[in-house]
Image (spheres, grey):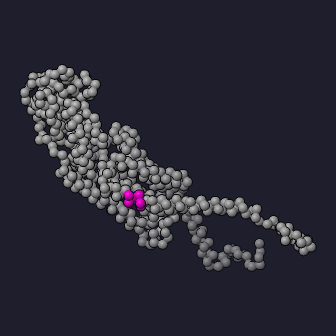
Amino acid sequence: MNNGSEPRSATNGNGAPVDDRLSRLTARSAARRNAIDAQPSVAAPPSPPAPDPRNGKRRSRHHAAKGSRIAALALSLFSTLGLGGYLEHANASSSSTSIPLATAATTTTTTTGTSASTSGSNSNGSASAASSSGTVSTGLSNGTFTGSAAANRYGNVQVQVVVTNGKITKVEIVQYPDQQGKSVEINNEAIPKLIAETLQAQSASVDNVSGATYTSTSYEHSMQSAIDQAHTATAST
Amino acid sequence: MHETLWFLTRASGVVAMVLIIAAIADGLIFSGRAAGKKHLRPAWWLDLHRGLGGYALIFTGLHVLTAFGSDIGVGLEQIFVPGAASSDTTAFTLGVVAMYGMLIAVFTTWPKRLLPRKMWHIVHLVAVPVAILTGLHAYLLGTDAHASWYTVLTLVLVAVVMYPVGLRLSGIYRRRIGATAQRDERDLAPSLSLQPVPFNSAGAEREAASPVCSGGTS
């Protein structure tokens, strides 16, 4: 492949380098090869990340949007805290418009034991198909009975019933979920319906109010507890 | 304490949803080649997209943790098992599935891509249904879902995400149209090309003698 120019060779006829630059490269290459040969055969441990040649510090992963990411994180954190605070504030202000509660009667106040044992009275709740899960309220002792507090995910529901002449004549709410504005809003609508149903059915068995399933279920449990107490008072007198 | 956690649950859920939408919008802008080249470079959008995705996952974790700790009847089973909730089953299930989808979208990308690029892209698109499921979960189960501020926020988020969705879809459409045009051009090209003319002295002499060209009529 002679193209007419002088052939490029590392050495001349005597084996000496042609020029200084080539001789330096050859010497460096030989030294590197010797150094490699001199290394032990075991694998070297992984070296730490190479230092940045500009400032000697360890090179970290480059983030093109580092500032924006930090800003987004800070904004998210502040939004969470701020929104949480706002919701708490809104809840506190809406709770002031909650439905009026009964004065909490922590103990059952049973008055006279004049139970009205009318026909069809049933204290174990198994007679009427319409009140299969509840208790027919006839046969109740007169008095005021407070049911147990029934918990759900939004809070407790506790009812108090007033029995007059063996009939439930008044239902009051001792406590209900009022920790959130939405709960207050829902319960303001649902609880009057539940009370009306109870007064009409004279039973704890009421239809769930749409959108207030938790409150309805807890209401039933607490109401059943209060009615059971009224029956117990009847049985004991 | 439980009350505070409950408010944090609601707030972190909303923020996580905003972050998910922001990450998706960012990703669509990046993948739609609408990121620009000068000031906000594609690398900037990509880095921010990754950051937003990670933060969305962190705030989702915070949402789940605070819900678990706020004593509202949310247990481990309801958090991790789809369909395990006895009440609001659909809403809970949507949230659980969205959480798993987000985990898949993030952890097949970060810390490094675990899949071949094409498969990764298909898997990564799970982020879009994740956003839809998150919105449904929030609407069905969210305490604040019917608040006016939440409605405004939802409208803003939809508006924010629709622009890059439009960009992305129009980009896909343009590329498909371009590819079809190229293919048609390729298919059409051989029928239009002239037959190669042999060039040698004998041929030249023949052509000079004959008025008919080899590639067509003169």
Side of B168 relative to A18 (left or right): left
- Residue shown at 83%/67% (left/top)? B216
Q: Is residue A38 above or below residue B116?
A: below
Furthest toward the right, the residue is B209
Side of A183 relative to B218 (left or right): left
Q: Is residue B157 magenta?
A: yes
- Residue shown at 45%/53% (left/top)? B127
The boundaries of the magenta stretch are B155-160
The answer to whether residue B73 is seen in the rendering is: no
The answer to whether residue A65 is seen in the rendering is: yes
Furthest toward the left, the residue is A112
Q: Is residue A62 above or below residue B57?
A: below
Q: Position of residue A124 (x, y in %)?
A: 22, 23
Q: Is residue B180 magenta?
A: no
Along the viewing direction, whichever of B188 and B83 lies nearer the viewer: B188
Q: Quadrant of residue B172?
A: bottom right
Along the viewing direction, whichever of B203 and A191 lies nearer the viewer: A191
Q: Position of residue B10 (x, y in %)?
A: 30, 51
Q: Is residue B183 above or below residue A234?
A: below
Q: Is residue B122 above or below residue A60?
A: above
Secondary structure mainly formed by the magenta segment: helix
- Residue shown at 39%/49% (left/top)? B136
